[in-house]
Image (cartoon, rainbow, N blue to C red):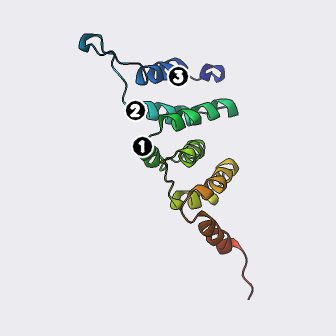
Amino acid sequence: MFSRRGRPTIAAPLAEALGRAYAPISRKQDDRKERIPTATVIAALVDALAQPNDHTLHHSLTYALLEIDVAPTLLDNLKNNNPAVRRALLMALENMDGGKLPAAPVVADLGHADAELRAAACGSSAATPNGAKKIAGFMSDRLPRKT
């Protein structure tokens, strides 16, 4: 996956991390498998999202974030400067039952230079409290005023 473009491959470590994070744990203490903390798995997914990816890989990584379903950690990662990462986080949080996507980062991304991030922010705004009102305010601030 990642090695096609001459980058070090991270697919194997990521797959191993995801596998260990969700590995069944035996009831016997001595047979217990060590699980990777969810925050470590999320960090690996965020790092992978920061790489140049095709649409299918971006979707798969985003879906993994959604399936992990740890909204507070994803909300903390919304500070990331990479538009592909923020787009994935917005999409995952928007689709989580407990995502509670705040309006501020969504509205901020409506004015971003990256068109795909703007589109994701526009789509995610419906999942935010008072999303329509926030978008209307954002748009009215950018429309020319009659004098």
Q: Report helix, strand or loop for mark 1.
A: helix
Q: Earlier in the sequence, mark 1 or mark 3?
A: 3
Pointer 2 local density, CA inside 10 Å: few below 14, some 14–19, many at least 20: some
Q: Report helix, strand or loop for mark 3.
A: loop
Q: Quadrant of residue 135?
A: bottom right
Image spot of residue 97 (x, y percent): 51, 46
Q: Quadrant of the C terminus?
A: bottom right
User: Distance from label 2 to label 3 (Cα)?
Assistant: 18 Å
User: Distance from label 1 to label 2 (Cα)?
Assistant: 9 Å
Image spot of residue 93 (x, y percent): 53, 46
Residue 27 numbered tag: none
Q: Is residue 59 left or right of residue 79?
A: right
Q: Report helix, strand or loop for mark 2.
A: helix
Q: Is residue 4 above or below residue 134?
A: above
> Are circles 2 and 3 on residues that touch, CB within 8 Å?
no
The number of discs equals 3
Amino acid tagged 3:
Ile
Amino acid tagged 2:
Thr
Q: What residue sits right under mark 2 in the picture?
A: 38
Q: Quadrant of the N terminus?
A: top right
Q: Is residue 36 left or right of residue 51?
A: left
